[in-house]
Amino acid sequence: MESPKQFPPATTPTCLSLSLSLYIYIYITHSSHRSHQLISNPFISKMKNLPILCALFLLILSLNLIVEARIRHYRWEVKYEFKSPDCYRKLVITINGRSPGPTILAQQGDTIVVDLKNSLLTENVAIHWHGIRQIGTPWADGTEGVTQCPILPGDTFRYKFVVDRAGTYLYHAHYGMQREAGLYGSIRVALPDGEKEPFVYDYDRSIILNDWYHRSTYEQAAGLSSVPFVWVGDPQSLLIQGKGRFNCTTPGTAAALCNATNPECSPYVFTVVPGKTYRLRIGSLTALAALSFEIEGHNMTVVETDGHYVEPFVVKNLYIYSGETYSVLVTANQDPTRNYWAVSKMVSRNNTTPNGLGIFNYYPNHLSRSPPTVPPSGPWWDDVEARVNQSLAIRSHPDYIHPVPQTSDRVIILLNTQNRINGSVKWSINNVSFTLPHTPYLISLKHNLLHTFEQTPPPDTINGYEAYDINVAPPNVNATSSNSLYRLKFNTTVDIILQNANTLNDNNSETHPWHLHGHDFWVVGYGDGKFNASEDPKTYNLVNPIMKNTVPVHPYGWTALRFVADNPGVWAFHCHIESHFYMGMGAVFEEGVEKVKKLPSSIMGCVVVIPRDFLSHRCLFLYFL
């Protein structure tokens, strides 16, 4: 059983504080004794020591305050290992031999230090701390090409940042498509001691839902980049906390690679005590799938999402999109003589992927005792209305509302479309397919290396948006690729309208979960069809909107976000589906970069080519940052 207050050993100055305080006390006592021999008046003697005693008191107080904010130090080695998470043996990227990786446990205000050794031998790596805003440390966001150079094979890189808000978060690879190769994990941040949440529970669990491909990320990326285009297809399995089960008798499956009796692919088991209430912190890091999750015979009460408390509401099944996190409360209040199924199901696309299965195990039933029932089949994959209704039901808890600015300074309408550029299939935003520069934006902007990326910003609205028909396959012959970025005026309020449309296939519009780095945003509205800039803002929820860092835009619909550009740095904003971001569905925001402190040299391992005119010369040379 996991306790809400379980934490790993932390590096604190407790022993130092006690030793230093004792030393000062002895010193003052000794000094006071000598002074007393010279001053016969006891009152004057006490008054003489009063400033020293006050200083001692303040020192001890300050040291106690330091103790409250701990340093949590992790040492991780990232490498490939052969694993069989769904019974099929393949190379998996692990952290200290594990996938999912270790859960980071901390309290609000703690400093996290991760020393990451890249033992992938032939690949670079970077890790993004999903949902951590990186206030004051934008270089620790872990986004290769945006905030740092990648970590080279054999190198060890230190990530150091503060977790400034309690909640449920994630971490995962942010280089190429490595996330779907197994490089991911959970972050659980508790409130400081003495503070309470607006709900009660007995035990706390972290669960990651994922989809799983048997083909390597290299094969998938090659297909996405090729002409003709080769789509990644449906995932072979769905994993619950890194465990799933592929049917080894599937035609075309090599018998030597698939072993249904391998204990690695035994179902994930949630053991519960009858009558107890559990907080399940559920995160999705799927490469493609939108999911429904349910526990047979049990209701779930949604109480938190992406680090923000929700006005509680009850669901039978939870819809969750890649990059989202939810906390739900589940009480073990059913027949304790049997076990129950936990089921994840792929929704939003017609698919052939079997459901993921786990076991909700009532103690003291045996862990491997299968439930006596057929697993729930889950909702229809194309029930868009049910998914939209859950999105609309998510509101801020009435006691934890963050007041939303009532107006915005800038409105950016991002039209998601599929395009062909030089024969390649791409995703585009306002007819611009995003590409990453070689030199990370944060380094380029701080060192004035503006030639390293395109300076013409992408458009706030596509030309001809008013006449654009989102319900037909787009011709969009004028789409281009670019690595330009949006420059946001610091401390202004920005509205982002995510507008969905038809893909290159007739009668098809997909669900896209969008994630913003460095910020939380207010989700002020959802709508069906095409966004009307004159009428639809009148329907915004400006009273109790939830704040999130990841949100879906539903098929043929729009989602409206509002945030304040008040975190100096350069921040990625992209679809969290691996293949979609790889194909160009993303953007980057810069805000207040001049306020960012001196960048650490550790992020500057890239080599860039810059003109010698930069130093009043003519030819080119290699400039090592």
Image: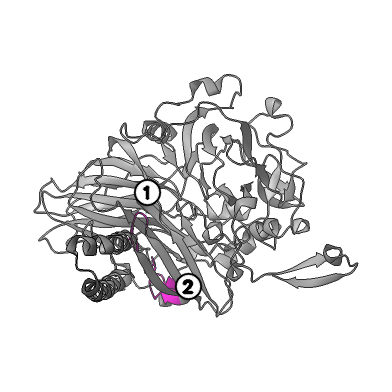
> What residue is drawn where x is 39% and y is 29%?
544
Mark 1 and 2 residues: CB-CB less than 8 Å, in contact?
A: no
| Residue 245 is a magenta residue | no
Mark 2 is surrounded, within 10 Å at the Cα level, by few (under 14), some (14 to 19) or many (20 or more) other residues, namely: many
509, 531: nearer the viewer: 531
Q: Is residue 528 left or right of residue 398?
A: right
Q: What stretch is highlighted in magenta?
A: 81-109
> Percent position (x, y) of residue 38?
24, 73
Q: Is residue 324 left or right of residue 444?
A: left
Q: Is residue 3 left or right of residue 403?
A: left
> In the rendered image, which quarter contains the N terminus?
bottom left
Q: How many marks?
A: 2
Q: In this view, does 503 lie above or below 374?
A: above
Specify the amino acid type for callout 2.
Leu
Specify the amino acid type for callout 1.
Lys
75, 264: nearer the viewer: 75
Mark pair 1, 2: CA separation: 34 Å
Q: Mark 2 points at which residue?
A: 116
Can you tell which quarter of the image residue 496 is in?
top right
Can you tell which quarter of the image residue 107 is in?
bottom left
Q: What element carries label 1?
A: strand
Q: Can residue 321 be seen in this view?
A: yes
Circle on res. 228: none
Q: Name the residue under label 1.
A: 345
Q: In this view, does 274 lie to the left or right of 385?
A: left
Q: Is mark 2 on a helix, strand or loop?
A: strand
